Image (tube, rainbow, N blue to C red):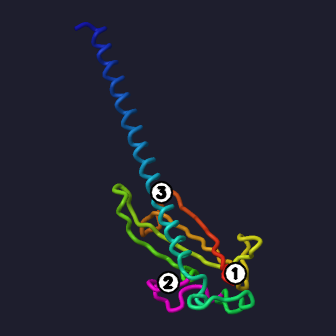
Amino acid sequence: MGTGQTLLTIGAIMLLGTVILTVNRNLNTNNLVLINSNIGLEEVSLATSVIQEAEGKAFDQHTINNPLNSSQLDSLTPTGSLGQENGNPNDLDDFDDYNGLNNQGRLDSIPLSTGEYYVRTRVYYVNANDPTDTSSVPTWNKRIDVTVWNGNANGTVNGDVVKMHSVFSYWHF
């Protein structure tokens, strides 16, 4: 085998090695994007589930058994008392019981993800004309903010943090 053939063979092997490394790098990048997309979908799904569950409850502790009329606004839970009445996280019977929930739990539907999903919620009264404006007094509108992220116990966040909110209004007069 001549010098030209040897150089041509070495060049072909180098080119093949470069192609193999590039393909492997692209496959790893695609896998990371796919895993992060799945984590994001799980976070959105979990946040949506919390919001839907909260909206399926009574508007307020005082509206569970008897409806209130428009003159009974002062019968609603005061702003400083929003949250669980008895401190039992399994006893969520009205919308504002979701205030201050800090849940964590492993979701095993993503085979390659690491860490746990953390959920934080906040419920507060908002003004009817501007649902972004917090009210210091009870109104017929409550807003829930749900924040979900995937991470580890040391505070590392894997992927993005999902923040969702919804306004729940009382219409039974």
Residue 41 in the image, given as x and y percentages of width and height: 47, 57
Q: Secondary structure at mark 2?
A: loop
The residue at 29%/16% (across/down) is 9
Range shown magenta? 80-94
Quadrant location of the N terminus in the rendered image: top left
Amino acid type at image mark 1: Trp
Q: Residue 86 in magenta? A: yes
Name the residue that disc number 1 marks. Answer: 140
Secondary-structure class at tag 1 = loop
Amino acid bearing label 3:
Leu
Q: Is residue 128 magenta?
A: no
Between discs 3 and 2, the one toward the N terminus: 3
User: In which quarter of the view is residue 12 placed?
Assistant: top left
Read off the residue under disc 3: 41
Foreground: 107 or 158?
107
Q: Earlier in the sequence, mark 1 or mark 2?
A: 2
Label 3 crowding class (10 Å Cα cut-off): few <14, some 14-19, many 20+? few
Query: Would you identify the image quadrant in which residue 79 lies?
Result: bottom right
Q: Position of residue 35 (x, y in %)?
A: 42, 51
Q: What secondary structure prevails in the magenta region?
A: loop
- Residue 32 appears at what percent x and percent y? 42, 48
Instruction: Specify the farthest residue to the right.
Output: 129
For residue 113, above or below residue 34: below
Q: CA distance from mark 3 to mark 1?
A: 32 Å
Q: Position of residue 113 (x, y in %)?
A: 38, 57
- Residue that badge 2 annotates: 92
